Amino acid sequence: MFETMTRTETLAGKPPVTFEPGTVADSYAVFMVFERAYADLTHRLGINETTNAADPEALARMWAARRPMYEHLAVTADQFWLAKRGDETVGFSRSIVRDDLRLLTEFFVLPGEQSAGLGRELLARALPPKRDERRWLLATGDLRAQATYLKNGLYPNFPVYYFWRQPRPLPPLESDLVIKTATASAETVRAMGDIDAQLLSHRRDVDHRWLLSDRQGFLYLRAGEPVGYGYGGPRTGPFALVDESDFAAVLAHAESHAAHLGRSHFGLEVPMANHHAVDYLLRSGFRIDEFIAYFMSNGPIGRFSNYIMTSPPFIL
């Protein structure tokens, strides 16, 4: 078990760094670290994207939308660590465990504090030594970070693209699927967990219970049996389908749902292993965002050809 630790180094006369366990009360502080680090990353990668960090009103809207997710991750985390210089949080790392899978949900350090050893310490705490543990993460294109992951035995499997457009109401595509609005019942969570176990090789019922409170869930039935699930509303995903050829019908329904809600934006975090979804979205005129992420793992990953990730992709 890691304990709170103080480093002896100082930076330009600043206080030394401490590493402390995070709690749900630290959610806003780590949200701000993410926003500032993300703005710096997109600038360094040459991505022409407007971020929230310099716009107080946009930042407040984003915090209101993402606060439930940050608090869910804090409450269900296995490891959650802060790097603090004095009273300021300058970096953090967090991982969750679902069955035999450890997912690194976040790992960010403020500009000006990077390449000083803080990241190495934070990552060691979020990924403690453990044999025979599956490990996943979604990495940015920052080569320094990717090199660190590679040194920890995590290798890229495929990129993840973000597809988006203003949603349109669409007629249902021909399909024998029955689409049922999901309620947060034990039966629904169990059915979704069974599909996860089949496609991803682990259950995450605790995440489905939260997702069903954050967005609208759907169960997809064939001959009365659940063969997939998906989430729509203000935020989308994940989507998991036993038969990947069902993605066209499911995504047309999800886009129509967003349009009927009056949403101005419909976006999806799509693994490039999911060719059925990619082909449908490109045929339908969706745009691809400049920012590309990379799914990395230390071993078997399941059937991502049958899957679309949670947006934003902290839970995958």
Image (cartoon, rainbow, N blue to C red):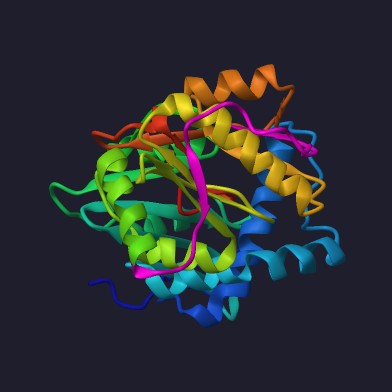
Left or right of 104, for residue 260: right
Name the quadrant containing residue 69: bottom right
Outermost residue on the left side: it is 131
User: Which residue: 77% across, 38% down?
Assistant: 169
In the rendered image of this protein, does residue 44 appear above or below residue 112?
A: above
Q: Main secondary structure of the magenta part?
A: loop
Please tell me which residue lies in front, 280 or 106: 280
Residue in view at x 52 percent, y 73 percent: 71
The verdict on residue 7 being magenta is: no
The percent position of residue 210, horizontal first and vertical second, equals: 47, 67
Instruction: Say above or below: 37 vs 5.
Output: above
Residue located at (84% from left, 66% from top): 56
Query: Which portion, as a residue range, is magenta?
Result: 161-186
Q: Is residue 13 visible?
A: no
Position above or below: 270 against 11: above
Question: Which percent across, then down, holds residue 310?
Answer: 52, 48
Q: Is residue 167 magenta?
A: yes
The residue drawn where x is 47% and y is 32% is 176
Which quarter shows the N terminus? bottom left
Residue 120 is situated, as x and y percent measured from the top left of the image, at 39, 52
Q: Residue 227, percent across and down? A: 37, 41
Q: Is 41 or 253 nearer to us in this picture?
A: 253
Residue placed most toward the observer, 131 or 1: 131
Horizontal arrangement in the rendering, residue 40 relative to residue 8 (left or right): right
Q: How many marks?
A: 0
- Is residue 212 visible to us here? yes
